[in-house]
Amino acid sequence: MAAPAVARAPQATRDPAQASTRRIVAATVAGNAIEFYDFTTYAFFAVLIGKTFFPSTSPFMSLLMSVAVFGVGFVTRPLGGVLIGAFADRAGRKPAMLLTIALIVVGTLGLAITPSYASIGIAAPILVVLCRLIQGLALGGEVGPSTSYLIEVAPPGKRGLYGSWQLASQGLAALAAGLIGVTLTLVLTEAQMLAWGWRIPFLLGSVLIFVAIYMRRHMPESLDIDKAASQGRSSSSRLRNHWRAVVLGILVVIGGTVSTYVAMYMTSYAITTLKLSSTIGMMATITFGLLTLLGALAGGWLSDRYGRKPVILWPRIALLVLTYPAFMLLINHTSLGTLALATVVLASLTAMSGAPSIVAIPELFPSHIRALGLSVVYAVGVAIFGGSTQFVVTWLIETMQNPAAPAFYVIITSLATILGVLLIPETGQDKALAD
């Protein structure tokens, strides 16, 4: 009776390559997409959430408070990155990914059922803040383990393509959120959307999470846990030996983070600054999601053929040059077409550059600190810049009285990313992972 047990163990825990590749990727991507769907849906309904939980005589202040609380969700990302990233390097990628998805259930469901400010007063925004903090903790801990898992199970020569599903799944999440948002704005009245319609996407996401949990429970493990345990020393002390990779990694993610969240802000931008309808504004979300999905996969595939650095660098330079003209075209010729075009420029170039970025960073670290290394880099970079982007651009537009202000922020942060890319080593073209 012992023989079958011995035969099954390697398949379950030591040899993920023997499992169905499609199932492995699907389980990882589904969970990641649903988590990001729940987190980013807030951004797309920021105007309605602001009116529900942060009422004000000034629509600008209501929106500003709403996007500020969107930023609160980034505060706990570094904590989630450190705690869950270290856990993933010690106990395995699979248990860490199950933990993050359980946390996102709590945060998302809590946000969906929190009564309005009119019903319970100051308790409403406090509960919203707590839910965003839990969501941020989950997302901070998700990226490191899931991306490490994808590149560890990838066949030779395909780490870029496999790892690009991390960012592609975020595009898939935005696409789903946009389609649901457009459908709701077409079916429901503005009063219904404000009263309860905006809660539907969060409730739907909460239900779908349980599907992702089921899928992840049957994933094989990609980390050699015995070897990780034998390394000794704490993960944080080992990570200090790779401080240069951490610093350069943060520089690399800054530009992608800002341009991603500026692109995500286009829905609120279209509604509040350009005075377009909610339905047209939501079309920016659909465009962003679709182009992020396609651009990320293209960037990952190209980076396997030509290396990580050139595929990170050239789309970022193109974004540096094209962002301001795209915004000026949109401002001077406001329409659904120009809104879609500006979003295409932001989303496609950001995704094409961002996908190899998020693959190259974990490739800089050995397996026993890979999840923690990426988690810290991504969570810190995104916490500082992603969490503040929508607040900053909302403030810049109002104080500068210039609707093109978001373009300036993208340009400045792109320069930091270009510097980081020039300094990191090449890790692609089928170079072996650090061990």
Image (cartoon, rainbow, N blue to C red):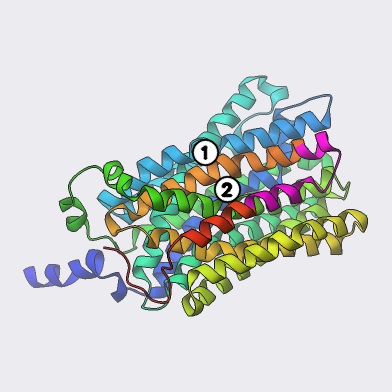
Q: Is residue 139 visible?
A: no
Quadrant of residue 290 in the image? Answer: bottom right
| In the depicted structure, whether residue 122 falls above or below residue 63 | above
Sequence order check: which comes first, mark 1 or mark 2?
A: 2
- For the residue pair 370 and 10, the one nearer the viewer reads as 370
Residue at 47% over, 52% down: 248
Span shown in magenta: 396-413
Q: Which residue is mark 2?
A: 38
Tag 1–tag 2 contact (CB < 8 Å): yes
Picture quarter with the C terminus? bottom left
| In the depicted structure, whether residue 432 falls above or below residue 68 | below
Q: In the picture provided, is 392 more to the left or to the right than 426?
A: right
Give percent across and percent down for residue 371. 36, 53
Q: Which residue is mark 1?
A: 107
Residue at 34% over, 57% down: 365
Dot 1: element = helix
Q: Amino acid at mark 1?
A: Gly
- Say which mark, if any, is on residue 131: none
Binning the other alpha carbons within 10 Å of mark 1 as few (below 14), some (14 to 19) or many (20 upward) gives many
Q: Is residue 120 visible?
A: yes
